Image (cartoon, helix red, strand yellow):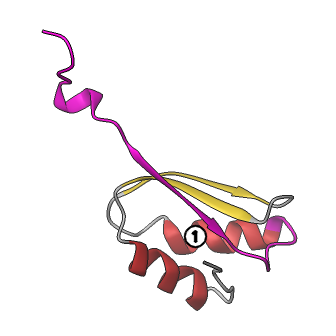
Amino acid sequence: MQGLKSPSEKEEKAMKLKVPGISCNHCVMRIMNALKPLPGMGNITVDIDKKTVEITGEPDIQAVTRAIEQAGYTVEN
């Protein structure tokens, strides 16, 4: 059967957020540590140069934004 995927082959959703305050490895670790415990998290990639956070999985966007803000950063739309 073509086009059907088993549960282990589900496509993961990805979201990319602009976080202008990212400037160093300490920022990366703070954001990673804030996001890791959230339910639905897949891979987390924080890019210092692009000032972005990319997340795979199916986390709640409001919970992600709140966690980043509680870590001391602003999320831009």
* Residue toward you, 21 or 39: 21
The residue pinned by badge 1 equals 33
Q: Quarter of the image containing the C terminus?
A: bottom right
Q: Please name the amino acid that badge 1 sits on.
A: Asn
Q: Which residues are magenta?
A: 1-25
* Residue toward you, 34 or 64: 64
x then y, percent, for residue 50: 81, 59
Query: Is 9 included in the stretch rendered in magenta?
Result: yes
**Compared with residue 23, is residue 6 higher up or lower down, i.e. above or below?**
above
x then y, percent, for residue 4: 17, 21
Left or right, 14 with reference to 47: left
Residue at horizontal 63%, vertical 72%? 31
Pick out the residue farthest to the top.
1
Figure quadrant of residue 21: bottom right
Residue at horizontal 59%, vertical 88%? 69
**Compared with residue 48, is residue 12 higher up or lower down, i.e. above or below?**
above
Left or right, 28 with reference to 11: right
Q: Label 1's element?
A: helix
* Residue toward you, 25 or 12: 12
Left or right, 31 with reference to 62: right
Figure quadrant of residue 39: bottom left
x then y, percent, for residue 64: 47, 74
Figure quadrant of residue 32: bottom right
x then y, percent, for residue 56: 46, 50
Query: Is 3 included in the stretch rendered in magenta?
Result: yes
